[in-house]
Image: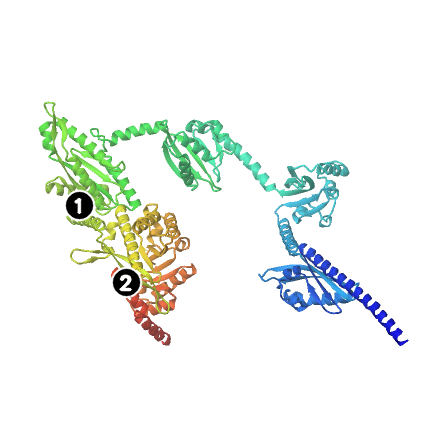
Amino acid sequence: MTTWLGIVGWILALVFGAGWWRAHRCHRRMRALFEAEQRWFAGLLDRLGIAYWCRNLDTQALWWSDGFRRMHGVAPDEPVSRDRALRHLVPEDRTRVNMVLETAYVQGTGETSYRIQQPDGRITHHILRIAVSREPASGQRVAYGISLDITDRVELENALRERTAYLEAIVAHLPMGLSVFDCDLKLRVWNAEFGRILELPSQLLTEGRDFDELIRLPAQRGEYGDVDVEEAVAQRRALALRFEPHRLERTRPNGRTHLVIGEPILHNGQVVGFVSTYTDITEQKQERERLERALDVLRTLLDNIPVGITMIDAELRLQVWNERLLHVLDLPRELLERPGVTLLDILRYNIERGEYGPSDDVDATLDAMRERVLRFEPHDFERVRPNGRVLHVRGQPLATGGFVTIYEDVTQQRAAQAEIERQARTDALTGLLNRHALPPVLEQTMAAAERDGRPLAVLFIDLDRFKAVNNAMGHEAGDAVLVEAAQRLRERLRGSDIVARIGGDEFVVALTGIQEEADAARVALQLVEGLSQPFAVPGRQGEAAPVYLTPSIGIALFPRDAHQPTELLRLADIAMYHAKGEGGAGWRFYTPAMNERVLRRIELEARLRDAIAQDRLVLYYQSIHALTEGLPLLGFEALLRWPQADGDILPPAAFMPVAEQSAELIEALGRWVCGAVVHQRRRWQAQHPDWPPLTVSINLSARQFDREGLAERVRDAFATAADGDTPATLPLLGIEFEITESVMVRDPLRAEAELSRLRELGAHIAIDDFGTGYSSLAYLKHLPIDRLKIDRAFVHDLARDADDAAIVSAAVELAHRLGRSVVAEGVEDAQQLAALHTIGCDAVQGFGLARPMPAHQVGAYVQRVARGEHLSLWHAARQAAGAIAVT
């Protein structure tokens, strides 16, 4: 029995074991299928951009999808925990999200929003939805969560709210009334001005108010005429439903006139509404009517005056013209009647037909004329047209812009006047000015020279031995000599110069536009050479015979010698007699002393030209130090010197005034300095490759700015000297150009353009000798300036003179406020250095630190600075500053 029971037990065990094994295998297959489906589902959500997680609320097991990790900036290998996920949220959102999670676990669902601080600093916005359910297999409670990135939606909503606020502000502050109705004629948008202009009560202006209700009130007030109110409303509703653009003026019963402009609102080609504006134009309309009446009166006047008239507005549009203008200017009627015609159209027409002479570039000529016209300055001048007609043109600017111009034909008057004046002014033999015409002409020329700030030279010319020739060969030969002499004078002088015959063989020449005395001497030399050539004149027997004459020329200068024409002529006459007394065939200035000075200047100029050509100039270098601990070296200022044969070395003050009298000479000197700096910097770089970058300052003459293209000339000088070694983009890097304040007043616009170009090429700009010239805050504000250099005159007594200290302190503060640095020149002692340090000056130079030195001594000086051997003045300044503080 026991045996059978054992056998049955084993059979039951095998049966139950086999069942358990089949159930276990089935469970494992189901679990594998579930996990595969879970991975597929998670991958699908991941591709849809949905972060997914689940938590077993019974076992507290937590799982994150890959999309969840990427969305929350969690590393793939970072362990899973709620705290780790919450750490990536914006701190203000963590507690709220945690509470929502706990509540959802209890209630079964939940939803909230949160923000994430991404690793790159961005803030992203997300929404979280939670659902809790029981797992069918185990019966355990599982919480499922999905997170969606709604950053784009949030940013769009914020942008829309901001844009809506802007639009509402614009609508509220428009200077005209505005209304917007939808396609059903319901009021959707309006502003307060809309209700004020149409006198509509505020309680009537509500969202969705029907068009009929708003129209009914003005209809009841009779604003649409004596018609039935409902009929008026129906008519206007029918018009509104057309949604047609309109622009009309309507005068209301209160006398105010409104400009009403309406436009349909389209979306995808369909009308969705209508926008209208209501502008009160009562004053404008009244002014327009007044102007129309005034124009009628003006037109009557214009058509009955014997001169041509134009009126141009501020935009140069032609507003008024008369019939006489067509005749005076010979203009086609269709040009002036063309809609929107401007003064520029008329000027272009005249340029193209050669009214102002030949022009190779019509647009360039028109641009130049436009620039003058836009100044709107009064003008009064005469112009001779190509057909010979003389016009007297007078223009007066208008207070509102533009100007009125009158064109008067004065051809006949000027022709008669010119003939009378010609006969009265002209020498009958030579055609030159005569003695009666010369004084007033000379007076006018002297006045012009005074305005221009330039000298005027008067040359008194007498032909040596003319009387002997006239007596020997007769008056006919003498007249021929005088005519030929006059011709030679004209040929050797400019058109602006004045030539006169004042009697016998005496001529007077007035040279205008000269720069210096030497110019007059050069012209006199040319005239001596020209008048010394043989004259071919008929002899008594009719044959041509050569006659040899020479001139004696006396020179007097305005304003140096005299201020009156008669006195200037008298002094030139005296100088001429001195020349004649010394043998003739030459020229002399009014006094021997002046003559000697001019000769010395000419000789100095010639030697300077030769020194440049022979490379006999040198550059000295004076150090510039930052006014900070250790006085670090910033660079050097290049100073020109001229060694003489006797061993002396001339400073710039001895020869620069002569160089600046000639544009060609100052340019040659500038090229030499640029080339010398380039060569010296190259030598320093080769000899001392370990040197820090040092700036080299070069002085620019104000005269160099007189010609356009200074920056390009400087660039070319550097390029030529460097032989291609300079960088193409910033060829002037490491160069500072120093200018004087006089540059800024000669031609500020040109100076600004040239200095800007120099900075574009890599250079820095400094104002030298600041405070001694034409200082102007406007120049400091607008010109591209990097540094101010305080003149030594203010530094010399800085530690003892309160006024100097105040001036320097104000200059430093001004420069710093404008973003410029300051260099003080002429620092010689510790007290000056201490005072400048206290004031806040940025840098210093002067004999107290280092005297200007030849280039070969610069290397040793840089080494001394590197060793700190230049700091004795700095230590003394620190002691001086301490003493001052104690005092």
Residue ID for mark 1: 590
Q: Horizontally, is 711 left or right of 322 in the view?
A: left
Tell me where residue 781 sits by quadrant. bottom left
- Identify which amino acid the numbered label 1 is placed on: Tyr
The x, y position of residue 277, in whole percent, is 64, 43
Lower position in the chain sequence, tag 2 or tag 1: 1
Depth order, front residue of 390/531: 531
Label 1 SS = loop
Separation of marks 2 and 1 at Cα, in angstroms: 50 Å
Picture layout, residue 163 above or below residue 58: above
Tell me where residue 844 sits by quadrant. bottom left
Picture layout, residue 263 above or below residue 773: above
Label 2 SS = helix
Q: Which mark is residue 812?
A: none
Which is more foreground, mark 2 or mark 1? 2
The x, y position of residue 179, in whole percent, is 67, 45
Q: Which mark is residue 858?
A: 2
Q: Residue furthest right?
A: 1
Picture layout, residue 657 above or below residue 140: above
Q: Horizontally, is 618 left or right of 212 in the view?
A: left
Depth order, front residue of 150/595: 150
Query: In this orientation, does residue 523 appear?
Result: yes
- Crowd around label 1: few <14 · some 14–19 · many ≥20 (10 Å): many
The x, y position of residue 497, in whole percent, is 25, 38
Residue at left offset 28%, top offset 43%: 449
Question: Which image quarter is the N terminus in?
Answer: bottom right
The x, y position of residue 639, in whole percent, is 27, 57
